[in-house]
Amino acid sequence: MEAFFEVCPCEIIGVTGSDGKTTTTTIIAELLRAAGYNVYLGGNIGRPLFTDASVMVPDDFAVIELSSFQLMTMNKSPSVAVVTNLAPNHLDIHTSMSEYIAAKENIFMHQGTEGKAVFNFDNEITKAFASKAKGRVVPFSRKESLPGGIYVKDGSIWSGREGFKREILPLADILLPGDHNVENYMAAIGAVEGLVSDQVIRDFAASFTGVEHRIELVRTLDGVKYYNDSIATSPTRTIAGLRCFPEKVILIAGGYDKHLSFTGLGKEIVERVKTLILTGDTAGQIRDAVKSAAGYAEGAPDIMEADEFETAVRTARDIAQPGDVVLLSPACAAFDRFKNFAVRGETFKRIVNSL
């Protein structure tokens, strides 16, 4: 990644965070394309961009997702840096939460005064980044109006940039479900404002169905909807997924242990899950967190365990009734049984489509 920054001839927009970075990166790239720009999308999202640098021109944009591992050694920052949020993650690899945060800070710490940094002000860690940024800070918040920032008011996303308040995007026009996707759009708007018209943003939001493996509707079978959220490799991502649905769901969870706490997830599962089907290395940890959560009673939710992933999916099929939602949102990485989250999601879709 350092080598790409050295040779890239065009403006780089970088995105990092614990949750939402792939969707936000994709939204930014697609908004720029819809506005007529030539865009290269890559990085941690799955496509290296180094070999594309030779054909890029200064008027292009490189939009890149950056992981904490890529950022750890970075001594350069993109001209536009976006941090969606931060919560404990990858503590199986990072020596501490402090190291994880310090890695994420590299996305903006090497900017000059001409740089722009977009931070989530609803997250205490990323809000604190603002005092360290050398360039212009664009805050965004779903919970409070921010002068000079991006915020939600009266059912719409607004901008207060340069002292002029204007409505950009009605929330009802966003096709993607969930408050976390509202935040993803606010982060993206903060990155592209001044480059993409408000009308382009509205048109795009009304048609964008999301990125594969992220609250992806796989199939409706016998009145039951099956959703693939395999990208949910941390408890906070699964919590965001659960909050997308007004009804209690049948949740399939568990996987590789990243040494993260499931305490907060346990409380959400008690409130939002009718049946929990656990599989993978962390099944016992998640079960214990649920049973220890306030409000838990035997059978609320029902907790089942399956040794094999396919058995978990077929168990969900057996117990689901018309009107139910079956959600794969593991809260864990996939490495205990799969090469990565994408292979896990593809396996889930194959099984669901064979039912």
Image: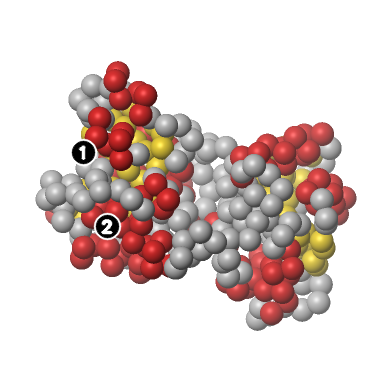
Identify the residue at horizontal 42%, vertical 32% (top origin): 48
Q: Is residue 132 left or right of residue 263?
A: left
Q: Is residue 116 above or below residue 51?
A: below
Question: In the rendered picture of this protein, how many numbered marks are placed on residues?
Answer: 2
Closest to the observer, 235 or 182: 235
What amino acid type should be assigned to the residue bearing mark 1?
Answer: Gly
Q: Is residue 82 left or right of residue 165?
A: right
Residue 96 x/y as whole percent: 44, 68
Q: Mark 1 or mark 2: which comes first in sequence? A: 2
Tell me the colour scheme of the image: secondary structure
Which residue was labeled with disc 1? 194
Residue 43 x/y as whole percent: 41, 37
Label 1: state its secondary structure.
loop
Cα separation, mark 1 vs mark 2, equals 15 Å
Identify the residue at horizontal 13%, vertical 46% (top origin): 114
Q: Is residue 69 left or right of residue 325?
A: left
Q: Quadrant of residue 84?
A: bottom left
Q: Which mark is residue 79?
A: none
